[in-house]
Amino acid sequence: MTDCYNTDQTSAPILKRPFVSQWLLERAIKSVIRRGTLHLRLPDGTSRQFGKGRPEIAIAIRDWSTLRRVAFNADIAIGEAWMDGTLTVERGDIYGFLDLCLSNTRTGAGYGLRRMQQRLRRLVRPLLMHNPVGKAQENVAHHYDLSDDLYDLFLDPERQYSCAYYATPNDSLEEAQTRKMRYIAAKLRLEPGLRLLDIGSGWGGLGLFMARMAGADVTGVTLSVEQQKHAKARADREGFGDRARFMLRDYRQEQGHYDRIVSVGMFEHVGAGHYDEYFAKVAALLKDDGVALIHTIGSTAEPAAPHPWIRKYIFPGGYIPSLSEIMPAIEKSGLVVSDIEVLRLHYAETLKAWRARFMARRHEVASLYDERFCRMWEFYLAACEAGFRHNGLVVFQLQLAHRVDAVPLTRDYLIEAASVPRPQLSADATVGARFETGGRVKEPTVCTTTG
């Protein structure tokens, strides 16, 4: 049995119903959808139903060519079909569809062709994750040098483009992101005047928070031209230019020694083949009595390959590591792991908030780019949220040091420091000032300057 084409002598080939592809796709869906119901409308208008119960999602595939691509390479073809409008959701939304699929694959359901494709991708993943200095900057520019206006539409005022820290799912995004920054400051044991290196400093929100709230002397390095320009301009505008400096520089080119090192949302771009190099550099830059905090998306599953759609359209060069890949590199560096914390559903809630804000201002995104770009980002945010809910994605916070006594013996200091907001220091405040501590108080007002 083969896929068929109908041709005549006066027209180009017209793809008729591809029977093998349809059979393969229906077999794959049937093997996956065990809980909930998926209705599939085919290009000829006929429908198929898979599974039973709630939730109920209905999708339509608009042409046979799309059906064939989805049947043979769903991981990339579903996202592309959604972007092109050849796969649509007729009941529910794109998040509901992806959530239904991933919540079922979590149970171990799946089909042989996809598992074989995943094994093949793992074989070639060293080539996919080669990330030397020049290539790293190209990869970063693909995503982070988009319009500043885009990120202002859905991020918090500090432009934290990383996992927030939720006390409850009812927290606002601003509350959760402020709590995340306070929590990181607590893990770093920051004190006024300490030299802090921020690897992958983004738009400068975290570095400026550390300078403003903890009195740290901050150096931030990033490979994004637009992020560095924004961070430097904001630091100068707010009077912190002498205490928070942001450089366009690869971390591998940094020199000197720092009391504290922080890296949030950057390790995902390092690439597994560069982990030894990364932690060796962190060890070389960190003072003997220093503390480092690495905050990265991670996987609770065995090492895999980058997702093909995410790699092609969103984060070229990006990779989600398993803990088993990270630890050997830390051990080789000589650093001590003083604490590991796994943040589980925090990023799912963060992405939910981003997606809601993005959709509320979708028309503004369309005016910046186009409809296909909007659909691409809808898919990206929805797929990532579903992944963090069902597909083993988490966030690792790794606290590192050279000495075993660099931090207290228990985590009590984290509970107190993360729950008590510190007073803001003005740009001309005495760096040697000490902080008041005490009982729980109201969340601080987040700085609303974004530039």
Image: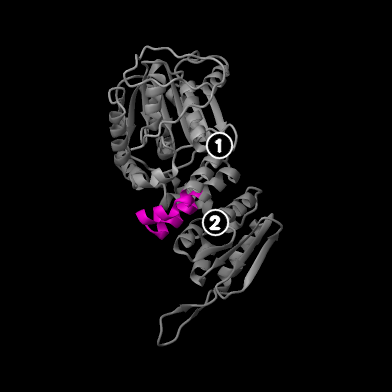
Q: Which is more toward the observer, 396 or 429?
A: 429
Specify how the rendered protein is coloured. one colour
Dividing the image into 4 quarters, which one contains the C terminus?
Answer: top left
Q: Quadrant of residue 92?
A: bottom right
Q: Give how far across and how far down residue 432 sits, in percent.
A: 37, 12
Which residue position is annotated with label 2?
94
Q: Residue at x 49, y 48 (%)?
A: 381
Q: Residue furthest bottom?
A: 9
The part of the image, by quadrant, that contains residue 283 is: top left
Q: Which amino acid does the dot numbered 2 rest on?
A: Ile
| Residue 150 colored in magenta in the image | no
Horizontally, residue 368 falls left or right of residue 331, namely left
Q: Is residue 186 left or right of residue 364?
A: right
Q: Amino acid at mark 1?
A: His
Residue in view at x 49 percent, y 44 percent: 354
Quarter placement of the N terminus: bottom right
Q: Name the spot of residue 417 as percent of width and height, x first.
A: 52, 20
Q: Is residue 65 above or below residue 197?
A: below
Q: Which residue is mark 1?
A: 346
Vertical position of residue 284 compared to residue 12: above or below: above
Q: At 42% from the left edge and 49% from the top edge, which residue is drawn?
A: 314
Residue 205: where, in percent of width, then height?
A: 39, 32
Is 346 or 366 nearer to us in this picture? 366
Label whose residue precedes the other's in the sequence (1 or 2):
2
- Secondary structure, mark 2, is helix
- Element on which disc 1 rests: helix
Q: Characterize the local packing of mark 2: few (<14), some (14-19) or many (20 or more) Cα atoms within 10 angstroms.
A: many
Relative to residue 254, is residue 223 depicted above or below? below
Query: Taken as a whole, is the magenta stretch helix, strand or loop?
Result: helix
Q: Which residues make up the magenta segment? A: 358-381
Q: How many marks?
A: 2
Q: Residues under labels 1 and 2: Cα distance?
A: 21 Å
